[in-house]
Amino acid sequence: MRAALGLIEAVGLTTAVTALDAASKAADVKLVGYEKVIGAGKAISVTVQIAGDVAAVKAAVEAAETAARKVGIILSSHVIPRPHEEIDLLIKAFEKNLKNKKTADTPAENKSQSKVKKSDKNKENKE
């Protein structure tokens, strides 16, 4: 990759999502992963990992911090410009984990949607 890796650690999911939204809108960056950490700052934190060009990641992290601080607490943020090749392996692992999380979430969504459809059909049959 040889671009940049940006890390934003926020307390709570709402703060993390706000940070990611601001980062995505501020620059051309890609979400490569996220991790839930229990016990960081005596709370549950979410670390958002983004990647892209150095300038884009720097701008995205700055925008993310500004927006997220209005909603909650940012524990830490950091940009690693042109990371070492070993960090590229870590980024690829983040991306793989993100894909696995998306795949794991999909069946649950389908089940909940099918339950809604069944309940709608039951309502229609009763009417």
Image: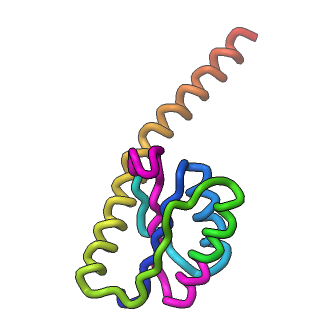
Q: Nearer the viewer, residue 32 or 118?
A: 32
Q: How many marks?
A: 0
Colour mapping used in the image: rainbow
Above or below residue 56? Residue 75 is above
Above or below residue 85? Residue 39 is above
Q: Nearer the viewer, residue 75 or 26?
A: 75
Residue 55 covered by magenta stretch: yes
In percent of width and height, residue 23 lies at 61, 72
Q: Is residue 90 left or right of residue 60?
A: left
The residue under the point 56% across, 61% down is 74
Quadrant for the N terminus, please.
Answer: bottom left
Q: Is residue 7 left or right of residue 21?
A: left
Where residue 83 sits, quadrant-wise, is bottom left
In percent of width and height, residue 38 lies at 39, 45
Quadrant for the C terminus, please.
Answer: top right
In percent of width and height, residue 37 lies at 39, 50
Q: Write the start and end of the magenta stretch as one range.
A: 37-60
Above or below residue 8? Residue 14 is above
The residue under the point 46% across, 51% down is 41
In percent of width and height, residue 73 lies at 59, 56
The residue under the point 25% across, 76% down is 89
The residue under the point 45% across, 37% down is 108
Q: Given the current orientation, which residue lies at the most extreme right position?
A: 127
